[in-house]
Image: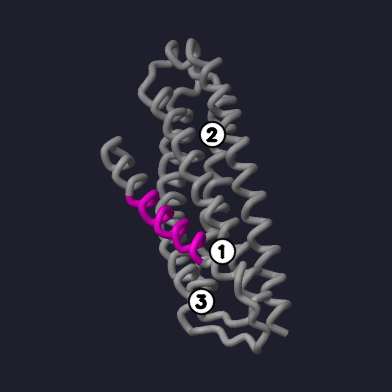
Amino acid sequence: MRLEHLKSRDKKTLIVTGVILVLMIVYGIYIAFSAGSGPVTLSPEFIAARNDAATVSREAVGLANETNSTLKRAILLNPQKEYSEMLRLFEEARKTNNNAYDEVFALSRYLQKIAESLGGILNTKSQRLAYDASITELSLINEFIVYTRYVNEFLDMLSYSTPDEIQTRAGAAEKLLFDVSASAKKINDLNAQFLEKMGKFDESLQ
């Protein structure tokens, strides 16, 4: 994918996450001074956005794990003897990474809808739980931007290299792959936290 397109996507995602962050700050202040304890009534918009966010988040995390696995398989190959297969895996990883980023951009839009709907949750406890889950998902989106950049740096370093160049750059590539794996772990951890917090939110509705 062209660098200009990636920068454009990053900019759009950062704009959306910036809007979400402002909404989160506003609702954080509101929640701090509110004391509602009435029944919880969820708007159709919140329910739809919450369900869509959970689905898309799961798909994005799955694609990130797939990308990470593909890169690990590729780096184990011998570029002198398995060059074509290595390039094929690099291209496969680039596609799954781009698909994951598309899912994360969609996730940012669903999260924005959730943030806009928080004011409709009148029960303070439930509202706080939804707020905490949304903050966690916002962190996941931001980490995914970091992850995607690491993956693209890795691929740009090796995808257009000769077998000899790949061997020369092996040390730098392993360092980047370590960063990719560490970021992927953070994404998985944040997704697990989001699901746990949404589970507590569901319990608060009962």
Q: Which residue is mark 2?
A: 71
What amino acid is labelled 2 in the image? Leu
Closer to us: 81 or 107? 107
**Quarter of image, res 165:** top left
Task: List x then y, in percent, for residue 60.
Answer: 51, 54
Q: Main secondary structure of the magenta part?
A: helix
Cα separation between marks 2 and 3? 43 Å
Cα separation between marks 2 and 1? 40 Å
Q: Residue at x 49, y 70 (%)?
A: 114
What amino acid is labelled 3 in the image? Gly
For the magenta stretch, what is the residue range? 12-26
Name the image quarter holding the N terminus. Answer: top left
Q: Which mark sits nearer the N-terminus, 1 or 3?
A: 1
What amino acid is labelled 1 in the image? Gly
Closer to us: 142 or 81? 142
Task: Say which element carries label 1.
Answer: helix
Residue 119 disc label: 3
Closest to the camera, between mark 2 and mark 3, is 3
Task: Say which element carries label 2.
Answer: helix
Cα separation between marks 1 and 3? 11 Å
Residue 28 disc label: 1
Q: Residues within 10 Å of mark 2 (few under 14, many from 20)?
A: many
Task: Say which element carries label 3.
Answer: helix
Name the image quarter holding the C terminus. Answer: bottom right
Mark 2–mark 3 contact, CB under 8 Å?
Answer: no
Q: Residue at x 54, y 34 (%)?
A: 71
Closer to us: 67 or 33? 33
Closest to the camera, between mark 2 and mark 1, is 1
